Image: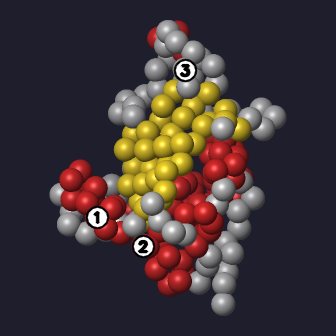
Amino acid sequence: MATTISSLPTLEVVLETDHPDAGLVTNDEWERWFAQWGQQMALTGSPIGAYELALKLTTDDAIAALNQQFRQLDRPTDVLSFAALETDFPLADELLNSEPLYLGDIIISLDTATRQATEAGHSLRWETAWLAAHGFLHLLGWDHPDEPSLVAMLDKQSELLAAAGLKSEKVG
């Protein structure tokens, strides 16, 4: 299901889960948040204003296998992103079809997210949205090879969550 909210871009989220806690955010919420983030980032490049991404909520074991396969790191991580476009977005006249522009894949370990949420004292729902925003920025070409880049990216994540009406939900 794709979500369009007023002037927000249409962004379909293909949600896949293999974790028992994956229902903490509905697919409609994911699509609304990503559409809002797309508007916040002035998402362009699709001649029809439609985008698609895949979001997988998984376990530490599953994300560790991907981390080993693609990054040669033998450990779980909180989020992995695989951008479909490794360069700038194509110009609209370069696209010949009317299919949504595929942005890529975001994989989040809910096991790691649970630990991080507990350590930070906020909800798993908020932590998962935070990680999804981080992954989304990676799909759009953001990276954090140094401290200033990381700070800029974390600031942008905060802006994205605020734009979607997500405030840190402290627990305990």
| Distance in Å between CA atoms under marks 1 and 2 | 11 Å
Please name the residue that numbered disc 2 is placed on: 112
Amino acid found under the numbered disc labelled 2: Thr
Q: Residue 150 occupies which quadrant of the picture?
A: bottom left
Q: Is residue 156 visible from the viewing direction of this image?
A: yes
Amino acid found under the numbered disc labelled 1: Ala
Task: Please tell me which of labels 3 and 2 falls first in the chain.
Answer: 3
Q: Quadrant of the N terminus?
A: top right
State the residue in front, 154 or 26. 26
**Relative to 163, is 13 above or below?**
above
Q: Position of residue 168 (x, y in %)?
A: 67, 72
Q: Are marks 3 and 1 in contact (CB under 8 Å)?
A: no
Please name the residue that numbered disc 1 is placed on: 64
Amino acid found under the numbered disc labelled 3: Glu
Q: Quadrant of the C terminus?
A: bottom right
Q: What residue do we see at 25% from left, 60% from top? A: 65
Task: Please tell me which of labels 3 and 1 falls first in the chain.
Answer: 1
Q: Is residue 151 visible from the viewing direction of this image?
A: no
Residue 99: image tag: 3
Q: What residue do we see at 57% from left, 31% from top? A: 51
**Relative to 89, is 144 above or below?**
below
Task: Please tell me which of labels 1 and 2 falls first in the chain.
Answer: 1
Left or right of 43: which side holds 140?
left
